[in-house]
Structures are given as structure tokens and as C-alpha cells.
């Protein structure tokens, strides 16, 4: 532990499980005050309790990040509790690619998939550009979209490619305001989403051992480490990048 985020505040959406939970705990271990957000209160309260058990400070806020009023209220709650918003990690969004083989074709999407990041990103930028020290934003995307493609996930891939495009445009628009924005794009990660229906972790390990050049999925803590780097002072000159973390799947 280096406490490189000591005294700073980090907001993490989609923080109740998976990558978001790992990111929230990683910031707490580095000394940050952490605001955990999502649509379901129970898991958020559990993560907040875990952070406090580490000796950190946490605030759990239930919010639908696709709704502008709720995202503004989320940012306001973070600032009211802890002061300036130094870091925001936008992990919540559309669900991962369909888990059944083949997925859904473009003309037959399971449901309309709209871009959910914009209201949250706008609220975060509006707050950070009022702060003397600005802030850092990391959007969590996917290796599907910009970096790789496969049948049956066109709508999902398009939504994730949009995250990268949005990040680059927003980064250019607001770096002069002191707001630095980047993306991480994970591939298969050690969460339930990377398992096929009925597949155990051991079966997944055997399958990806042949599918991925690295021979394994990424740990959520490894993705979190990349997020913390992009949010840190060490990444000060990194603007508008898209950091791929996919065990070589896109090669």
C-alpha cells in the first residue's frame, strides 16, 4: 500500500460486484474516500462495510446512471460528504455480451441498448472543472468493439466502441479544464459474466487455456490496478487513451 490517493475522493459506479467492486476496494486500500454507486442497495452497502473494515471511509448511493437527475444527485452527494471529486470510474453500463453461443444478431437484439455513460460523465465533468485541481475520469469499456469483433454481439460491441469514441472526444474537450479522461477495455475477466451458462470456474479455466494467448482470464484486481494507474498522478500525461487488458485475445 502506497496511500497514493490518501485524502482524495473516488466515485465508482457499478461498484456492487465484479470489476467495480475490485476498483472500489483498490482505491480504499490506497487511502481514498470511496463513493460506491449502483442500482441495488444491498451489494453497495456490503462493499461500503468492507471498505470501512479496511479502515477507510465510504458512502453508498443508489442511482440509475442513465438518468441525468440521479447522476447529478450522486455527484452532489459525493461532494457534500467528502469534498472535491478527484476521481470518477464509470463502470456501470449495458450488460456484457450475451453468454449463450452465437449471441444475438444485429437485426435481432435482445433489447434496445442505449448509451448510459453520458449523463454520468457530464455531471462528473461539470463538478471537476470547478475544482482548482481538476480531476481524473476512467471509463470502463470492453475489448469487443474497437479492438476485436465476433458474431452475435453487434449491438453490445457498438455500445462499447462508443465509450472509446466518447472518451477521446471528451478528453480533448476538457483537458484544458483540468479534467483528464481515459478508458480501460477489459477482455475476459474472472467474473460470472465470463462463464457460459452452467460452466464452472474450472471449466472456464480449461476453455480459455486454449482460447487466450495468455492462457487465463484477467483477475478483477488486475483491471483495478490499471484503473488506479490511469487515475494517478503518474499518468498525468496520459489523455484520451484506451488501455486494453484482454490476455491477448485481440491479437
Image: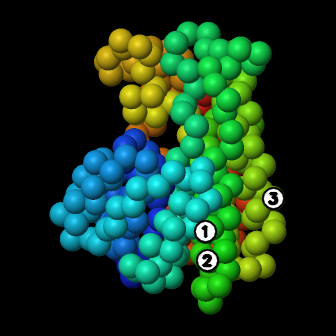
Q: From mark 2 to mark 1, how far is it between C-alphas? A: 5 Å
Mark 1 lies on residue = 124
Q: Nearer the viewer, residue 215 or 108?
A: 108
Mark 2 lies on residue = 127
Coordinates of residue 11 in the picture (x, y in percent): 47, 65
Coordinates of residue 247 in the picture (x, y in percent): 54, 33
Report if the CB atoms under discs 1 and 3 are less than 8 Å apart. no
Q: Is residue 17 above or below residue 136?
A: above
Coordinates of residue 50 in the picture (x, y in percent): 23, 57
Q: From mark 1 to mark 3, how far is it between C-alphas? A: 15 Å
Q: Which of 167 and 5 is in front in this view?
A: 167
**Residue 12 seen in the current view:** yes
Place residue 198 in its image quadrant: top left
Residue found 68% across the figure and 50% down from its top = 242
Mark 3 lies on residue = 169
**Residue 20 seen in the current view:** no
* Mark 2 surroundings within 10 Å by alpha-carbon count, few (fewer than 14), some (14 through 19), many (20 or more): some
- Secondary structure of the residue carrying tag 3 is helix
47 displayed left or right of 11: left
Q: Quadrant of the N terminus?
A: bottom left
- Secondary structure of the residue carrying tag 2 is helix
Say which label, 3 or 2, has the lower sequence index: 2
Residue found 58% across the figure and 62% down from its top = 69
Query: Which numbered mark, 1 or 3, is in the foreground of this view?
Result: 1
Which label number is shown at residue 145? none
Coordinates of residue 237 in the picture (x, y in percent): 69, 71
Q: Is residue 146 above or below residue 108?
A: below
Amino acid at each position: 500500500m502506497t496511500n497514493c490517493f490518501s485524502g482524495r475522493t473516488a466515485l465508482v459506479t457499478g461498484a456492487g460486484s465484479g470489476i467495480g467492486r475490485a476498483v472500489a476496494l483498490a482505491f480504499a486500500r490506497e487511502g481514498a474516500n470511496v463513493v460506491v454507486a449502483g442500482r441495488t442497495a444491498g451489494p453497495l452497502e456490503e462493499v461500503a462495510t468492507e471498505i470501512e473494515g479496511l479502515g477507510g471511509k465510504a458512502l453508498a448511493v443508489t442511482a440509475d446512471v442513465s438518468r441525468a437527475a440521479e447522476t447529478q444527485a450522486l455527484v452532489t452527494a459525493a461532494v457534500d460528504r467528502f469534498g472535491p471529486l478527484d476521481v470518477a470510474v464509470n463502470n456501470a453500463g449495458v450488460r456484457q455480451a450475451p453468454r449463450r453461443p452465437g449471441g444475438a444478431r444485429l437485426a435481432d437484439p435482445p433489447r434496445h441498448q442505449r448509451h448510459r455513460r453520458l449523463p454520468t460523465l457530464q455531471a462528473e465533468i461539470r463538478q471537476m472543472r470547478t475544482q482548482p485541481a481538476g480531476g481524473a475520469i476512467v471509463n470502463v469499456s470492453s475489448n469487443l468493439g474497437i479492438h476485436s469483433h465476433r458474431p452475435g454481439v453487434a449491438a453490445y460491441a457498438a455500445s462499447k466502441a462508443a465509450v472509446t469514441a466518447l472518451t477521446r472526444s471528451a478528453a480533448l474537450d476538457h483537458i484544458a479544464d483540468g479534467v483528464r479522461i481515459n478508458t480501460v477495455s477489459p477482455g475476459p475477466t474472472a467474473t460470472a459474466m465470463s462463464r457460459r451458462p452452467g460452466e464452472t470456474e474450472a471449466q472456464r479455466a480449461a476453455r480459455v487455456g486454449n482460447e487466450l494467448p495468455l492462457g487465463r482470464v484477467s483477475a478483477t484486481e488486475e483491471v483495478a490496478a490499471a484503473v488506479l494507474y490511469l487515475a494517478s498522478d503518474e499518468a498525468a500525461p496520459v489523455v484520451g487513451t484506451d488501455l486494453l487488458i484482454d490476455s491477448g485475445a485481440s491479437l
